[in-house]
Amino acid sequence: MTIRPPPSIHNFAAEVDFALRAMEGAAELLDELRRSSQIQSLTKEDRTPVTAADFAVQAAVTGLLERSLPGEVLIAEEDAGRLQGEEARRWVDEIVASVRRVHPAGTEEQVLRWLERGGQQPERRFWALDPVDGTKGLLRGGQFAAALALIQDGVPIIGALACPRYDRFGEEGCLALAVRGEGAWAAPAGGGGWTRLLVSSTADPLHGRLLRSVESGPATNRKLEEIRRELGMTASEIRMDSQVKYLALAASDGELIIRLPRSGGQHENTWDHAAGVLLVEQAGGLASDLNGERLDFGAGRQMVRNLGVVAGNQRMHEAALAALRRLGLGTPAKDLAGVRRKARGK
Ligand code: AMP
Ligand code: MG
């Protein structure tokens, strides 16, 4: 099946076509995992897990890019270097077999070369791919997504997600698409029409539902509780892995996302937010960092010019930024100096 773009999209036809085919291919590779809980994983240096599916989706999408839009730059999460050595042999066989569902004539050499392309540094225009965002969610039976964005001059132009376990639009999960200036949509992954996405109109923070990660430490839990109290949010919060949180926000299944910076001062990965943020913005919402600064997706593989993310419908975004200011939970001045230095390229 080849899904057609929503009829009202007029710009970036070739890029939209590629993004949809890429997420359709990803959904096909991830389909079996939708139902399973017995999935093998390895633990990476950053202590997050990776599965053969992460590599297979990354290679399959890169192969499609090479064929559809040759010469484009792509940054992607997984490092092909991990697949060297005897131990990885079984994984390579599994990955190549999986990629062949999308590229029937794909060779091992080609698959490994496609994987290496993801290690590039971003340029003025590039694609950012997270082949499996929320791998922990995948492993625990929760939400996960493949996420792809086209970024130009620091701004996401196209954002696309494949969300195999998000069943709001159909039992087999859904695809979501946003194009700058043209809107955001979701469609059942098993086929069916597009639904235009609009953020919720809930204006009173009292009824606002906070969408937040499943993974978080005690310091983050404490701060988020403080923010909810400051905003007077009494509705239950929603814990969810991956950028499916942004889709939920865009589809009015929640009102606010707050991502606090990790305590080690590590910045957010570009591929973890670009597609999701565009979905929210094109559904009528707003996103910024914790200080209300514009999110700059052109800073590198990591978003070194921003700290944290706040996204919401317009009212909740504004209220959350005000609450963060009152609580002094924006960026501490000493960290802000570092962020500004990085922004100036020093
Ligand atoms: P989530 O499912 O929202 O917890 O996000 C998962 C993705 O975000 C993974 O790619 C993680 O490596 C990354 N991640 C999780 N927590 C943080 C954090 N506090 N700061 C930066 N990246 C994070
Ligand atoms: Mg991720």
Image (cartoon, grey):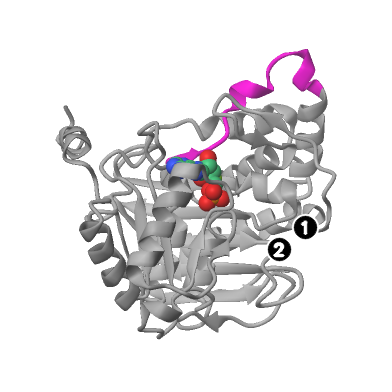
Up-down: is 295 above or below 86?
A: below
Which residue appears at 45% of the width and 54% of the height?
149
Q: How many marks?
A: 2
Find residue 100 and report its image quarter: top right
Farthest residue toward the top?
85
Q: Is residue 74 in view?
A: yes
Give how far apart the Cα atoms at labels 1 and 2 are. Answer: 6 Å
Magenta range is: 72-89
Residue 9 in percent (x, y) is at 44, 77
* Residue picked out by circle 2: 165
Q: In this rendering, is residue 42 above or below 195?
A: above
Residue 335 lies left or right of residue 82; in this view the side is: left
Residue wearing tag 1: 34
As helix, strand or loop, the secondary structure at mark 2 comes to loop
Q: Which residue is drawn at 26% across and 70% down?
A: 318
Q: Which residue is drawn at 64% across and 23% down?
A: 82
Foreground pick, 241 / 260: 260
